[in-house]
Amino acid sequence: MKVFTQSVNFNADKSLIDYTQAKVASLVKYHDKILDAEVFLKVQNTSDKENKITEVKINIPGNELMVKKESKTFEEGVNLAVDSLKRQLKKSKEKHRKTLI
């Protein structure tokens, strides 16, 4: 699976990009037909501590799953987004199985 990572309003270091790609790539365990994933890491210019936005979009045949999380760090945001996508992928796979029966 290809994982495209983009950082907006800042330059992401290699360790953050590697961490993000490894976490998102682990979603293959939950759905075997993932085409690709797009990750957007954004910094909002606000005084809030939770100004880091992580958006992950997963493309599967016939569907597109999207998650957006705000957090204090990008690592935390990626973890929250991946956990949320695990649930969505499991639901999507169950629905697909039911339509086949």
Image (cartoon, rainbow, N blue to C red):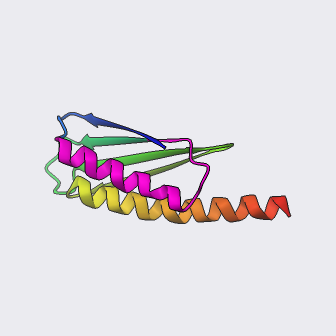
Residue farthest along the right direction in this orientation: 101
Q: Specify whether residue 97 is painted magenta.
A: no
Residue 9 as seen in the image, left or right of residue 69: left
Residue farthest along the left direction in this orientation: 47
Residue 99 x %, y %: 82, 59
Residue 62 x %, y %: 69, 43
Residue 100 as seen in the image, left or right of residue 26: right
User: Which of the 4 quarters of the picture holds residue 26?
Assistant: bottom left
Residue 22 x %, y %: 34, 53
Q: How many marks?
A: 0
Residue at image location 34% in from the left, 61% down from the top = 79
Residue 35 x %, y %: 56, 41
Residue at image location 30% in from the left, 48% down from the top = 53
Residue range highlighted in magenta: 13-37
User: Which of the 4 quarters of the picture holds residue 40?
Assistant: top left
Instruction: Check the image and report above or below for 14 versus 94.
Output: above
| Foreground pick, 83 / 97 | 97
Residue 18 as seen in the image, left or right of residue 92: left
| Foreground pick, 41 / 16 | 16
Residue 45 as seen in the image, left or right of residue 76: left
What secondary structure is the stretch in magenta mostly built from? helix
Instruction: Check the image and report above or below for 26 versus 59.
Output: below
| Foreground pick, 43 / 88 | 88
Q: Specify whether residue 24 is painted magenta.
A: yes
Quadrant the C terminus occupies: bottom right
Residue at image location 58% in from the left, 57% down from the top = 31
Instruction: Check the image and report above or below for 36 versus 65.
Output: above
User: Which of the 4 quarters of the picture holds residue 8?
Assistant: top left
Instruction: Check the image and report above or below for 20 versus 101.
Output: above
